[in-house]
Amino acid sequence: MTDQAYGNLQYPDVLLHIAGEWRQARGGRTSPILNPTTEEVIGHFAHAGTQDLDEALAAAEKGFAQWSGISAFERSKIMRVAAGLLRERVRHIANWMTLEQGKPFAEAQAETLAGADLIEWFAEEARRTYGRVIPARAGSVRQLVLKEPVGPIAAFAPWNFPINQVVRKVSAALAAGCSIIVKGPEETPASPAELIRCFVDAGVPAGVVNLVYGTSREISPYLISHPVIKKISFTGSTPVGKQLAALAGTHMKRATMELGGHAPVMILKDADIERAASVMAFSKFRNAGQVCVSPTRFLVEESVYDEFVSTFADAARKVKVGSGLEDGVTMGPLANARRMDAVEDLVQDAVQHGAELVTGGKRIGNKGFFFEPTVLSRVSQDARAMNEEPFGPVALMVPMGSIDEIIVEANRLSYGLASYAFTRSAASAAKLSDNVAAGMLSINHLGLALPEVPFGGINDSGYGTEGGADALESYLNTKFVSHLQAD
Ligand code: NAD
């Protein structure tokens, strides 16, 4: 999109941003963008080639030299301006996000505004990148721990949260004093491009923030192995994460990996069942279940199982599915045809393995990637959906004998991202907190993903965190200086 066109609410053709310039790919290549609600082409994005990547790398190297020399106080001020611009521009950005990704407008708006909060939090945190003084063994020695930005970053972001996944990476990098090349999500490119525009318009110098789109499997090895890049951050699936982490390891690059999950929801018999069902149904069908922390395996104590399943299924039946731009719609389409095929297969497989289909289970209509909010009961552990991330609007219910059985099932998979529990017992809450193998546990409410708290997983869900002070730390090197003072 050109600067003159800014403010035009028509869905734009999306450009690269390299060395301070919005432009087409040098080779002139573009690729189409589909609206998942209509399956129609709504625009095109500039498809970067090697020359574009080389220019982005050179820009990021220069940008780093400049940005790392600007005080944290000044960086923080520029970032706060960007947050303000994002808030001002929320309407058209959310509109474009709904067109390209499908989520309801209200969710797109909330994601965009949450992005502004996140930028502000990191802007503040930029001013607190403290080092330390360590008392020395000899009086004439001064021992300092200094924090320095790691250097130019390559960030890879997916399509499910087009702003949220990019803003976390860009904000932490800029706060630390790093430059960044974002490989944005090709299926949802316009809204993250507008986020980058906010940073550019706020006064982030040319070359500090660069944005490219193209062919993932070509761009990622090129950037990760390039000597200019000092750290990578990837959000996406576990198989791709493992490949990129291996490549990062080969080149000894630091990496943050935010990968898939298969969140257990542990419902104990003393829980407030009504509340648990309504909070979890809201969370399950948000973004049509295409969320890495989406609640997925519902492990419910036998004595409250039927009550929980029927209350949850009632809530599922009330979800209004449709175009995200229509009033009252609470769930849009799946984001692409791949998800439709994957979700259909997983549901069929679960039913073949003996699961009872309580509600939903099939595609809606034949235009747009709409799928019914689905509840499956008494799902066998052998069903694929109990082992692979469904990444769709599918809730899997399983009756369980005791809290101990629940913990064993919660920890059975190699994933370890989010987990949820509902109980009125402080002792049970403590037991779950101590024994559930996950990066995050939220008890009796939805308490994840605020800017100031850690956000990340363990085991196959990846490593590192994208929230809170720890997120900033991962963009900083620690340098130790021991100084014997001259006579
Ligand atoms: P996928 O594995 O093909 O891609 C996942 C994401 O990684 C996409 O954004 C894609 O553009 C990107 N990607 C793929 N290959 C890449 C590469 N070589 N280098 C850099 N980026 C690459 O799967 P998909 O069909 O797009 O998404 C479905 C699966 O992805 C889901 O099952 C889910 O597990 C996972 N996913 C996770 C998140 C998350 O928030 N952790 C987000 C989106 C997708």
Image (cartoon, rainbow, N blue to C red):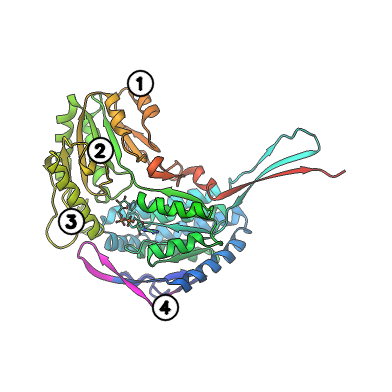
Which residue position holds label 4?
Answer: 27
Does label 3 or label 1 sit earlier along the sequence? 3
Disc 1 marks a residue whose amino acid type is Ala
> What label sits on residue 297 in the rendered view?
2
Q: Give the number of the mark in front: 1 or 4.
A: 4
Q: Nearer the viewer, residue 221 or 126?
A: 221
Disc 4 marks a residue whose amino acid type is Gly
Quadrant placement of the C terminus: top right
Expressed as whole percent of the image width and height from the top left, the position of residue 213 reads: 40, 66
Q: Residue at x 28, y 50 (%)?
A: 290
Circles 4 and 2: CB distance less than 8 Å? no
Q: Quadrant of ligand 1?
A: bottom left
Mark 3, secondary structure of its residue: loop
Magenta span contains residue 422: no
Mark 2, secondary structure of its residue: strand
Disc 3 marks a residue whose amino acid type is Phe
